[in-house]
Amino acid sequence: MNSVNAANIIQAARGPILLITVGVLMVVDYNTPFSFGRTWPALIIVFGILKLLERMAGPAQAPSYAAAPSYTPGVPPGFQPPPGGYQGSSYQGSAYEPGPGYQGPPQDPGGNPK
């Protein structure tokens, strides 16, 4: 058995082992003078032992993710500039370049933007 499988087995058994520990502590609470309020730290101890065993067994298999697409600030995801860039502009390839015939924002008669 390799270390990755051992770590996965310990990780999978953690929940059932902790439930068994809670059950044992309840039996101790019911049948002995020790209440659950005095024995609950055993849960932390058992959890810590399981984490140590998991780390000693080896690293768990890391999830594999597909390579994330590159991100360019200000450009929407999936944006593809037109072939040859934008015509009539010094900002070739800019995502914010206006199309042909764009007159700019509306202006009042004094030439100030509305």
Image: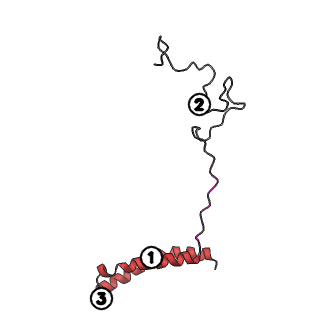
Extent of the magenta region: 59-68
Q: Residue, x 61% and y 42% (percent of image)?
A: 72
Q: Residue tagged by mark 2?
A: 96
Residue 21 horizontal/vertical position (percent): 40, 81
* Contact flag, marks 3 and 1 (Cβ < 8 Å): no
Type of residue at label 2?
Tyr
Q: Quadrant of residue 102?
A: top right
* Contact flag, marks 1 and 2 (Cβ < 8 Å): no
Q: In the image, is 94 to the left or to the right of 106?
A: right
Query: CA separation, marks 1 and 2?
Result: 55 Å
| Structural crowding at the residue carrying mark 1, measured as other residues with C-alpha within 10 Å and reported as few (<14), some (14–19) or many (≥20) | some
Q: Residue, x 50% and y 18% (percent of image)?
A: 106
* Pair 2/3: label in front: 2
Q: Residue tagged by mark 1?
A: 47
Q: Is residue 65 magenta?
A: yes
The residue sitting at the top extreme is: 109
Res 31 label: 3
Query: Can residue 112 be seen in this snapshot?
Result: yes
Give whichever of 74, 26 is nearer the camera.
74
Above-or-below relation of 54 to 98:
below
Type of residue at label 1?
Phe
Q: In the image, is 12 to the left or to the right of 95?
A: left
| Structural crowding at the residue carrying mark 3, measured as other residues with C-alpha within 10 Å and reported as few (<14), some (14–19) or many (≥20) | few
